[in-house]
Image (cartoon, rainbow, N blue to C red):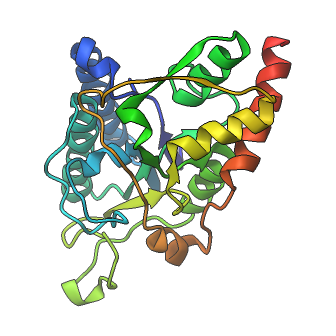
Amino acid sequence: PDVVVHLAAQAGVRYSIDNPRSYLESNLVGTFELLEAARAHPPQHMLLASTSSAYGANTEMPYRETMKADHQMSFYAATKKASEAMAHSYAHLFGLPVTMFRFFTVYGPWGRPDMALFKFTRAMLAGEKIDVYNHGEMMRDFTYVEDLVEAVRRLIDTPPVRPTAAEDIAEGDSLSPVAPWRVVNIGNSQPVQLGDMIAAIEDALGIKAKRNFMPMQPGDVPATWADAELLRSLTGYVPGTDIREGVRRFVAWYRDYYQI
């Protein structure tokens, strides 16, 4: 293949506490097998999914790709950060052009049923309470799935090139000084309070949520917020779907798919 886009993973912070081995086998061993295949049959560009969870304990926001990210808060995040490091070594050793993209809370049709939007919508339609973690004091940079796809599609056309000198790396670029490798945020750059996301579901459904306030879950972080300037400089594009519009589209799909 000319291009490889690697999205497969065992995803999710919370399940990684219960079943870490599945993350080891899928995210580390699985990515290793793909890198070995690319070593044997080099593509023109490899694009591998990482996660905003890689920023871990960082509190300075918005998150920029040039920040150090050494203190992951969950085993899921640790496996994705390790995948970035593995891919960097292959980029350096074998000249494989690699772009790692860190997704920020992707939502929309055909998403994962364990994500809050699915769980809240199902519970509200059933008249059940929704579990609201950290007593609602959470912010997420929600990114609509179609925006993410557009960003990935555009990044395909911008493979990194190994720099000949450090001076060749533009300010704010995460390009490695020793490999054709970079990491790019894909996020809406608009952090949204969890309560505002719930309000968007309420508006789309015409149902008021019954809230069950819970403490913060282990491994989770209170906020995420992407700096998307590198994505803009590389592709001319930044995600921008408003949370209310994205949730409205999701709810319409959900009702149609589940015939509710």
Q: Is residue 17 visible?
A: yes
**Residue 66 vertical position relative to residue 76 in the rendered view, above or below:** below
Residue 245's x, y, as percent?
76, 49
Q: Residue at x 51, y 49 (%)?
A: 193
Residue 200's x, y, as percent?
69, 41
Q: Is residue 19 visible?
A: no
**Residue 182 vertical position relative to residue 126 in the rendered view, above or below:** below
Q: Residue at x 40, y 43 (%)?
A: 137
Q: How many marks?
A: 0
In front: 122, or 12? 122
**Residue 85 vertical position relative to residue 16 in the rendered view, above or below:** below
Residue 123's x, y, as percent?
63, 15
In front: 167, or 96? 167
- Quarter of the figure with residue 221: top left
Residue 35's x, y, as percent?
31, 38
In front: 150, or 240? 240
Q: Residue at x 57, y 16 (%)?
A: 129
